[in-house]
Image (cartoon, rainbow, N blue to C red):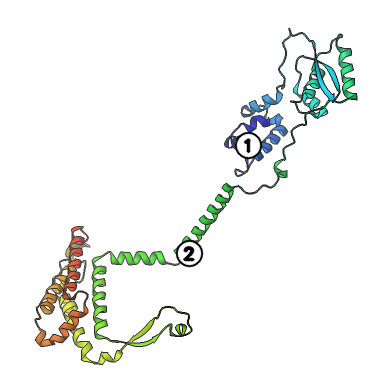
Amino acid sequence: MTTWLQRQRKQTLLDLSDEAGLRQDTDSRKEQIVDALDAYLQRNATQLGSNASFDAYYRMMRRTPFKGRSSSAVAHPIPITIPLDENEFEVKSVVKGRGRRTTKVKQEFDSEGAAPSSPAAIASSSTALAPITSTTTTTTTTDLTSSTRAPAKRTPGRPLRPSSTQRLPVPASPADVANLAEYETTQLYAGLNDLYSVSGVPETIDYIRETCSSVSGIQTSIQLLEALCLQRAVLPWLYLTELNSTIRRLGLGGPVVKLYYPDLFALLSSTFWAPTLIYATTAIFLPSLFAYFFNLTLRDIKRHGARVTVARYTLDPLTFNIVKAVLTYVVYARGVGGQIVGEGNVGVVENAMVGGYQGMLVGNFVVMIASLYEAAQGKV
């Protein structure tokens, strides 16, 4: 019965519904599941009565709610005084006896319309179910007639609980609001993740990371930094305008962004080409020449049955940076060759670099350490 079902857990009720062949929504409340399962079991009592999973349910349904009396019990009328009005009382005779079938008790409750806990309902049910003997027939008939003329005050029964289809709307609980907020947040994150994946940003980041995580990437980054520093020194930039000058004149404030452009006419002068050629010779051309011929990354491998020599790098990064460090120290620190190319041009290159010639040497040492680390890992 419903009382037995209400004592079960929600997951147990869902399992019983599956056993009975009733599909229920797992998101439904426990009261809805109990009502639906109770109605379904009552409609299909014939088919499901033999199922061992529902023995307790149908056993409670077949059992009489009143305890039976033994055969040795003597039926004696028990007078019960029930108040009818302020100055009036009625004495009824109730005879205790054996309980009968549940179906008749249920019909008696339905006809009387009172809850089983009501004294009047108990008295009426007991009177109807008790074995009437010759000595108590007259008393019982008289009591029933009096009860018909002057009905006793009864305790109002419990109001029927609304079914799942007639459930009154209730405001959302804090747990429901929290679940809804969590669901919406998850959907938002999923949409942003999809947009991030479609944009191609992850692939670009992975490519940049793979490129920079190599000796070639480190060498290229250092060379670009040195070239940028030299370009800012030999190629002057001229003032063009202020980007937010109009906004500031209107009194709206804001930062001032000044725009500059490179003076391309400097490309026709020796002040640009002399320092640039000195740097290119000592930092690119001569180191590349030595790195090509003194390549320590050459290895002999077998290919199609023949032994061939291959190189991991066309220009050995270790040899390149050793030669570059030697030339940097000789030319910029010792001033060797300054009489040929000019002391002023050498000074321009040295002053343009971050940290002077010491900064260039640090960059060379970094690439050399990376090359040795790569060789120690067996990648070469």
Q: Residue at x 23, y 81 (%)?
A: 230
Mark 2 is surrounded, within 10 Å at the Cα level, by few (under 14), some (14 to 19) or many (20 or more) other residues, namely few
Question: SS at mark 1?
Answer: helix
Callout 2, which amino acid? Leu
Q: Is residue 74 left or right of residue 206?
A: right
Question: SS at mark 2?
Answer: helix
Nearer to the camera, 333 or 76: 76
Q: Which residue is mark 1?
A: 17
Residue 62, percent from left and from top: 71, 23
Placement of 227 over or under 301, stated as above or below: below
Placement of 120 over or under 75, stated as above or below: below
Spatial CA span between label 1 and label 2? 43 Å
Nearer to the camera, 99 or 171: 171
Nearer to the camera, 250 or 131: 250
Do we see residue 373 in this rendering? yes
Q: Residue at x 71, y 44 (%)?
A: 165
Q: Which residue is mark 2?
A: 195
Q: Quadrant of residue 45?
A: top right
Q: Is residue 279 left or right of residue 60?
A: left
Instruction: Give the mark, 1 or 2, whose residue is nearer the N terminus.
Output: 1
Nearer to the camera, 378 or 85: 85
| Quadrant, the C terminus | bottom left
Q: Residue at x 19, y 83 (%)?
A: 348
Question: What mark, if any, has residue 319 been given in the picture?
Answer: none
Do we see residue 280 in this rendering? no
Q: Is residue 57 left or right of residue 361?
A: right
Q: How many labels sit on residues? A: 2
